[in-house]
Amino acid sequence: MTLGFSTDRPDSWQACSACGNETIITDPRPRCGNCGGLLEVHHRAPDLTRDEVLRRFTERRGGRGAAAASGVWRFQEMVLPGVSDIVSHPEGNTPLLRRAAVERWSGVPGLALKHEGYNPTGSFKDRGMTVGVTQARRIGARAVGCASTGNTAASLAAYAAQAEIPALVLVPAEGVALGKLAQSLAYGARTLLVRGDFDDCLRLVEEASRELGVYLLNSINPFRIEGQKTIVLELLQQLGWEVPDWIVLPAGNLGNTSAFGKALHEAERWGLIDRQPRLAAVQAAGAAPFATSFAEQFRQRRKVKAETVATAIRIGDPASWDRAVRAIVETDGVVLAVSDDEILEAKAAVDAAGVGCEPASAASVAGARRLAREGAIQPGQSVVAILTGHVLKDPGILLEYHRERQPSPPGANRPIEIDARLSEVERVLKA
Ligand code: F0G
């Protein structure tokens, strides 16, 4: 599985994204020892042609072993070469769906939905976590931890359980969707309900990692980013390495936006693609510091007190800011904010098409509709929207939307209670 590399430079190393200071691949700190900037992983390109690399990625599909079964490790040369003790569920291999009803609703013909909710714990976080926990084991971490709005916690809990490393997760005491909290408990993570928001949780877990030696597995961990790059690599592979015009994704802590930018940059540098798609990062209007800053040409970093129904992206002070700015600038990308009503309407459209996703995920589809209406996405352009999490992550919002909300919102499907008589069924069918 490991490639033969030809020179004496290591296969991979880490470098600070702010000051360029380099450190070894097994350095456990997520931040630069010099300036406190976020670290990034770099891999030396293998001594192979484009066709040889692509053939390797293709041949692994359907082959044997972890690298073949996983939609992350299939791309190992671009993720974490040189490691064979892999903690893989497996994960990835998520479908690219097309649904006429969603195309009609969004006004984007040919819209493809890359559904990351098909991952083992129901969100894209598994792609980063298989790499993060593999690295944790590689460096002999005695405990792993994260702050989370829910999905990262669920994913860390599952992968740490598999690796038999104790896990600590910090989530806001209020506002974590039911499915996610339930998963963290089920998979056995020590779960702390912090009286505060996600931004408080992240501050606290960073402190705990520094002071108490817990290996930090938030998306500021550069190995998480390496795994999440494979969302882009896999969708390019599914499109026969034909580059779409747009990739639209929800944005919260900006780890994924950073990962997408890095994947595209490297895919171009390795000669796998010959141009970049435009990235569109979509925030919820009540948690949109990055969108505000984009409108100001990123002249200053912004923070807000976040509030949105899309609890996964209820984040006011995104951690991966600088890396995400680079991703948007390098891809001629855009950042926009959509309202909670637009998110829920998009979610109802995705759900009613039989696909389903959690609220934060629907921000991408709401964003695609807005961009098409504003003329940024032009007729005939190819667009991939990322659905980041599974519909069952947040059953609470579903029942509230369909059963309780007054007046009845678009697409609401009210359940009807009846007595156990055929005439009652008949009455409903005739109505
Ligand atoms: N969609 C879902 C379903 C998420 O769970 C998240 C982030 C995002 C989108 C945004 O991705 O943070 O990389 O910009 N969830 C994190 C968590 C914060 O803790 O589970 P991002």
Image: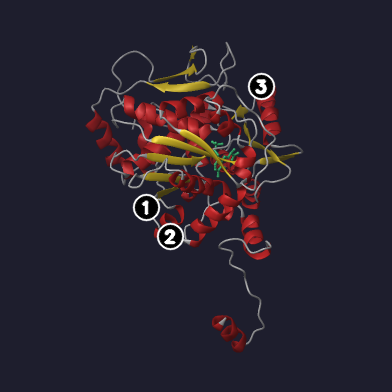
Residue where numbered disc 2 is placed: 101
- Residue 142 x, y percent position in the rendering: 61, 29
Residue where numbered disc 3 is placed: 210
Residue 178 in sight in this render: yes
Q: Badge 2, how many Cα within 10 Å: few under 14, some, many 20+?
A: some
In 3D space, how far apart are the residues under numbered discs 1 and 2 (Cα atoms)? Answer: 10 Å
Quadrant housing the C terminus: bottom right
- Residue 124 x, y percent position in the rendering: 50, 42
- Residue 258 x, y percent position in the rendering: 49, 30
Q: Badge 1, how many Cα within 10 Å: few under 14, some, many 20+?
A: some
Q: Secondary structure at mark 2?
A: helix
Foreground residue among 360 and 163: 360
In the figure, residue 149 lies in which quadrant?
top right
In the figure, residue 306 lies in which quadrant?
top right
Amino acid carrying label 3: it is Arg
Relative to 128, say whether 352 is above or below: below
Amino acid carrying label 2: it is Ala
- 2 vs 3, front mark: 2
Foreground residue among 356 and 349: 349
Q: How many marks?
A: 3
Q: Which residue occupies 63% across, 27% down?
A: 302
- Residue 168 x, y percent position in the rendering: 66, 36
Q: Quadrant of ligand 1?
A: top right
